Image: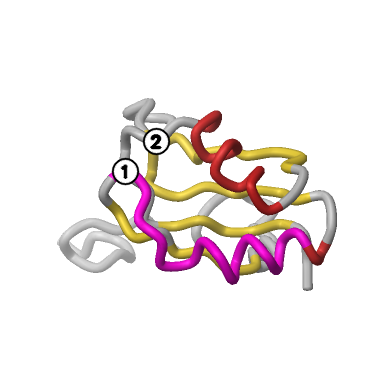
Amino acid sequence: MGRKLYVGNLSFNTTDQQLANTFAQYGNVDSAKIIIDRDTNRSKGFAFVEMSTDQEAQAAIENLNGVEMDGRALKVNEAKPMEPRDSRGGSGGGFGGGPRGGGRNRF
């Protein structure tokens, strides 16, 4: 069991502080960060909370998963490790896309 938790189905109005206060009922919260869309500067509706111990993280999962916060039922579980990204920063190879499905133009 890890100490980092995924929290999904958040209201767009929930703040980092509200999230931290909610999880603090079950132990020490090392961090609580709502993920923000960089284009819209708005919540993406999920966050990551890091608890001080595995036991505190487990208690938070058991007590908060499915509980309503800001009118939404929270989804709380252990965060999965981040998968490595392509070192080129793109989504793969190929020659550009578009409605024709990629490749060279054949005129």
Q: Does the segment drawn in magenta span residue 67?
A: yes
How would you rate the neighbour count of disc 2 (Cα within 10 Å): few for under 14, some for 14-19, many for 20 or more? some
Check contact, mark 1 vs mark 2: CB within 8 A.
Answer: yes
Residue 83, horizontal then vertical, whole percent: 66, 65
Q: Main secondary structure of the magenta part?
A: helix
Instruction: Name which residue type carries label 2.
Output: Thr
Residue 82, horizontal then vertical, whole percent: 67, 61
The image's mark for residue 14 is 2
Question: In the displayed structure, would residue 90 be above or below residue 30?
Answer: below
Question: Foreground residue, 107 or 5?
Answer: 5
**Residue depicted at x 58% and y 36%:** 21
Q: Is residue 27 left or right of residue 90?
A: right
Give me the C-alpha separation between circle 1 and circle 2.
7 Å
Point out the stretch of residues depicted in magenta. 56-70
Question: Foreground residue, 8 or 93?
Answer: 8
**Residue depicted at x 18% and y 65%:** 100
